[in-house]
Amino acid sequence: MLESNLNPFEIIKLYSGNTTFMLMFALSLIYLWVFEKDKVKKAVLVILSVTLLVLFVLPPFAYFFMDRMDESGTYYRFLWLIPTTLVSSYTVFCILNRFKNKFIKTGAFAIVTVCVMIGGVFMYESPTFYDAENLYEIPDCVIDMCDDILIYEREYEVVFPDEILQYPRLYSAYIVMPYGFEMLQFQYGRNDDIHEEMIKDTLNVPYLAALCEGKHVHYIVINQNKKLDGKFEDYNYEFVGEYGDYRMYKSTTMFFGPWEEYEEWLAAHE
Amino acid sequence: MIAISILQCILYLFVIPFCMGITFTKHFDEKYNTVGNILTCGFLSELAVFQVLFLLFYKLDRNLAELTWASSSILFVVSLVSIIFGFKSIKKIALPKFDLGFLVFVLFSVYMVVMRNLQGVNDGDDSFVIGNALTTLTTNYFYKIDYYTGKFITSTSYSRHMLASNSIFIAFLSKVTFIHPAILAHRILGSFVLILHNAIIYNISVLLFDDKKEKYRSVFASFVSLMTIWDFHSYLTDSTFILSRAWQGKAQFVALSIPFAIMLLLMIGENAGKKNIIYVFIAVLCTASVSMTPVAIVLLTLSLAVGSVCVGIAVKKIGVILKMIPALSPMAAFAVLFYLFLK
């Protein structure tokens, strides 16, 4: 999502990045507007694109979409409707078709291809991607943790640090959390006291353990980079193991067995 | 078990779409009756059927198991009827020209699919898409459990997403194929959508370059792929969504619905709006697009409405514009539903 106070021109600027492809698209529109003879192609590729662009920056339309429909954070999606890649590519071939000499045509195409590769930004080098560690495309450490947590087919309440908050429930719906990814994405106006404690650089272990026990949290996962102001072992949580950058602690007072055995366990502990 | 999963994937992602798609493409001009178009039309039809059934089952407070039975049965029957009536048109399927350019285009497509499978994506939206699919699959109920936390849903914050059945469709596919939703979405559905996207691009190239310029088709499609791969100008671009999270509804909207709408507009222009089947398919496309993302109600409607006016003026046929009105009627119904859900 984008910040909600951006105007359409700022969104186009952000969308276009280094503007190479947007410039190519703009020049293509001009070229096709002047030279394209097929009316249908001109209508779909040029007139439709220009109309949509005008609508995008038109204040009443932008106001309607961003404010009335409450889509300010996703208004950039409107730009998806404009077939920038198709228009630019089609123009390249229209221009190439003008060259009669085959060698010049091939040379020009090679130059355009190189220009696209230099001016463009290679997708798979973006920070969005990382090497997939397994079939699930979930970090191995999270899968290992979940496998160790899920002793029986029942729910276990677990607290995870923000960095891996989105993954556990992609692996198993039996992992239950006092707060989830919505805390990072929407923040819903919720103030979860455990989350507030978990994001501090130094964790107040007695306080965090008490909060977690109060909310019936079976496991606590802590980033190893955090400083601990105390030992979980002194507050009813035992160390389970290290998983990559994370350490996991397990409650020593809660019930972990299958629900059929709960009554029996409760009677023994009363 | 693996063999059954593979067979079920083939059934639900190739056989059923193929059978359903042929209903539409047999009425297209012969050169557009391609495997890519058949599969895309079929997959979009499958999504549209599922979308209608999901909303019905949600409203009736039914569960995933019942929806799976009903959807599978209806999809089988529709596919069977389609293939019986469209069997003869299989012989008329147009094949692409297998030249060096086409080989390059295939290599680009393979490269995209391979990279999709080698690289994971750090994207929080999966918490909803796959989280909801897995929660639905595990609990068997729709939107009773919060996909982010696993607690009971107490607010209506989900209702905005509810109109799009994308994550429930992943749960449905996962149930019939016995594959974990994360694997199914990331590996199979992601790759499948990329293949369909490239097929649409190739079919657009058939429309843009007539038989005299046939040699450009494959090279054009390859060039579009190249531009898509080099289009990470920001995390907002359509290419970023297509290549990084093709299993998610909004990415499917960008990868399939929008280019397909462009293709249909070009086809309408080519035959001056005479082929009514295209308008029928636009209604299907609208329903399928809403199943991907509710924002399609505004975006696709606008694109097709403005596009039909542009084409109508270009070919000087008012019918092109008038026929678009009933074709877009599902969007009006979904707009009303969206308003009701938000209320």
Image (spheres, coloured by chain):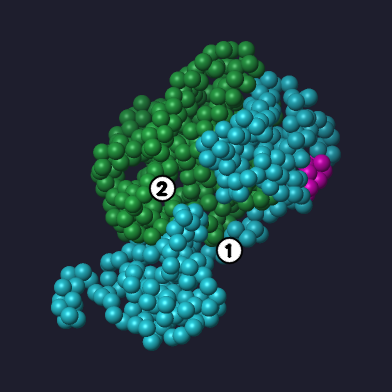
The mark lying in front, picked from 1 and 2, is 2
Tell me, yes or no, whether dots 1 and 2 are on the same chain.
Answer: no
Name the residue carrying label 2.
B157
> Which chain does tag 1 point to?
A
Look at 33% across and 79% down and name the residue there: A251
Q: Amino acid at mark 1?
A: Tyr
Tell me the crowding category of disc 2: few under 14, some 14 to 19, or many 20 or more residues within 10 angstroms, Cα based: few
Determine the colour of chain A.
cyan
Q: Position of residue A35 (x, y in %)?
A: 78, 25
Look at 50% across and 66% down and name the residue there: A162
Q: Position of residue A240 (x, y in %)?
A: 39, 82
| Residue B13 within the segment the image draws in magenta | no
Q: Is residue A65 visible in this depiction of the protein?
A: yes
Q: Secondary structure at mark 1?
A: strand
Work out whether residue A264 or residue B88 is closer to the camera in this orientation and state it.
A264
Q: Is residue B247 left or right of residue B64?
A: right
Work out whether residue A174 or residue B159 is closer to the camera in this orientation and state it.
B159
Which stretch did the figure color magenta? A106-115
Q: Secondary structure at mark 2?
A: loop
Q: Which mark is residue A130?
A: 1
Q: Is residue B263 left or right of residue B39?
A: right
Q: Quadrant of the N terminus of chain B?
A: bottom left
Determine the colour of chain B.
green
Work out whether residue B137 or residue A265 is closer to the camera in this orientation and state it.
A265
Look at 65% across and 44% down and name the residue there: A6
Q: Amino acid at mark 2?
A: Ser
Q: Position of residue A105 (x, y in %)?
A: 81, 38
Disc 1/disc 2 C-alpha distance (Å) = 31 Å
Against B212, residue A262 (above or below) is below
